[in-house]
Amino acid sequence: MNSLLRLLPMVALTLWSVSLRAADPVAAWRAADDARVAAMISADPAKLATVFSDDLLYVHSSGTADTKSSFIAALTSGKSKYNSVTYEQREFRELVPGLVHMTGRAKLVLGKAAPFNELHLAFLAAYRLEKGVWRFVAWQSCKLPEPTAAKK
């Protein structure tokens, strides 16, 4: 009976680790990114502070760069106003345990009032696992050319 009681914690730990490996990591990364986009649209400072890493480097398609504090300030003041982000493509890849990069294309609508600034971007972003939470640590984007009309 004593040896059975000693085995119980080991069995529980094994089952727990198997369940963690069976969980879909892409779903967790997608959820972290969805929470980040929602926080940016809401411009809620508490949510932004939670989803952004303290080491955030956000390089806009214009080439200007923000840190966590400067980007939160721009979002909460309304200087930068994100209205929507629509992904055309979004892919995740774990580079090393605890570091994931995301690539893709998206359409963003920005601005306080019409006419809104509509951007079509390609991007590279990164998430890092920090104390058990996936936090947004980097963004770099570039504007994609407007599609040309078909020649007749």
Image (cartoon, grey):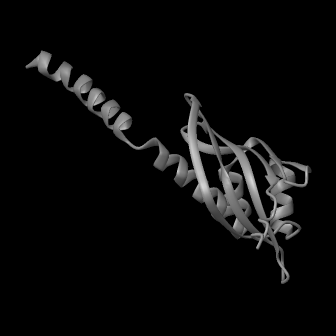
> In the current view of this chain or complex, which residue is farthest to the bottom?
114
The residue lying at 22 percent from left, 26 percent from top is 11
Residue 82 visible to an observer of this rendering = no
Nearer the observer, 40 or 5: 40
On the image, the x and y values in percent for residue 106 come to: 68, 60
- Asked if residue 7 is positioned above or below residue 59 in the image, the reply reads above
Q: Quadrant of the C terminus?
A: bottom right
Q: Position of residue 137 (x, y in %)?
A: 71, 42
Counting from the top left corner in percent of width and height, residue 87 is at 62, 61
**Furthest residue to the front?**
152
Which residue is at a point 71% across and 44% down the rendered structure image?
124
* Vertical order, 93 against 60 (above or below): above
Residue nearest the observer in this picture, 9 or 23:
23
**Foreground residue, 11 or 59?**
59
* Quadrant (top left/top right/bottom left/bottom right) for the N terminus: top left
134 vs 152: above or below: above
Q: Residue at the top extreme?
A: 3
